[in-house]
Amino acid sequence: MKNTIIAPSVLAADFANLQRDIEMINTSEADWFHIDIMDGVFVPNISFGMPVLEAITKHAKKTIDVHLMIMDPDRYIKTFADLGANILSVHYEACTHLHRTLQAIKSEGMKAGVALNPHTSVDVLEDIINDIDLVCIMSVNPGFGGQSFIENTYSKVEKLKAIIIRKNASTVIEIDGGVTNKNAKQLVSAGADVLVAGSFVFKAENPTQTIADLKALTTI
Ligand code: DX5
Ligand code: ZN
């Protein structure tokens, strides 16, 4: 049986009721907190930064999965470790020396992730896959919640899964952007291990139930 990890994206939470929304995730069937950090340079939007993450980690009782959409992320690796990140993902497109960056993340005691924009082929990770704990396949262009899912994602997941198996790596595959109950099952069948969901969870009438439904749908 496959137990898919569900990671609600805090970007879609109500920031005026952040503690309430964090407690909702704590008591739900969700597995991780997905935290989106945007710098207004790598992506055309600014989300939130260190003080907000500090406030989140004070209350969050589950794995903290941080997705950095920032240029030159090496500058902040230690800061995110100190703030309580358990997994730190950087964008392939934002790192000149990806291998060095991944080693730096691991040396701070975190799992190292690499996120890929929709236009970036999974093939670029072939020679470094054994050093990556998690690949985050962006199924929307990063920068905003609430966008529509890009259908080409399924074949990217299948291709990446084949590389992971061929290289005998233990990398997990995360999907981020536009995840709903319409595409969740097919993503898992294609090889996804972690599903990030922002709007689908937080805009729902009953977010706790929506998380439980996603979990049930993807336990196959
Ligand atoms: C997009 C972020 C996503 C976003 C997902 O740049 O990386 O994590 O919050 O939100 P939805 O699920 O609404 O597409
Ligand atoms: Zn994200």
Image (cartoon, rainbow, N blue to C red):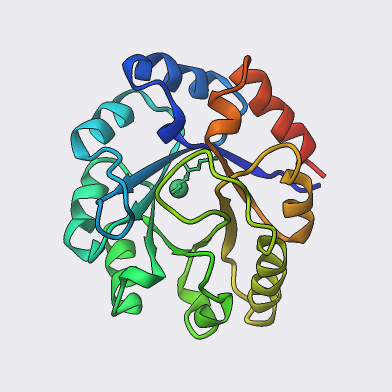
Residue 218 to residue 152: above or below: above
Q: Which of the 4 image quadrants contains residue 43?
A: bottom left
Image quadrant in which the C terminus is located: top right
The image position of residue 186, as x and y in percent, is 78, 52
Residue 81: horizontal and vertical position, in percent? 26, 49
Compared across the picture, whether 198 is left or right of 105 comes to right
In percent of width and height, residue 8 lies at: 52, 35
Q: Quadrant of residue 156?
A: bottom right
- Lateral position of residue 135 relative to residue 29, left or right: left
Q: Residue at x 73, y 36 (%)?
A: 181
Between 210 and 80, the residue placed more toward the observer is 210
Relative to 108, residue 183 above or below? above
Image-based side of 104 in relation to 1, left or right? left
In the image, residue 114 sits, relative to residue 99, either above or below, namely above
Give me the residue at 27% from left, 35% from top. Answer: 53
Count every numbered label the image shows and give the total: 0
The residue sitting at 61% across, 19% down in the picture is 208
Relative to residue 179, is residue 163 depicted above or below?
below
Give whichever of 154, 31 is nearer the camera. 154
Q: Nearer the viewer, residue 109 or 203?
A: 203
Q: Quadrant of residue 216?
A: top right
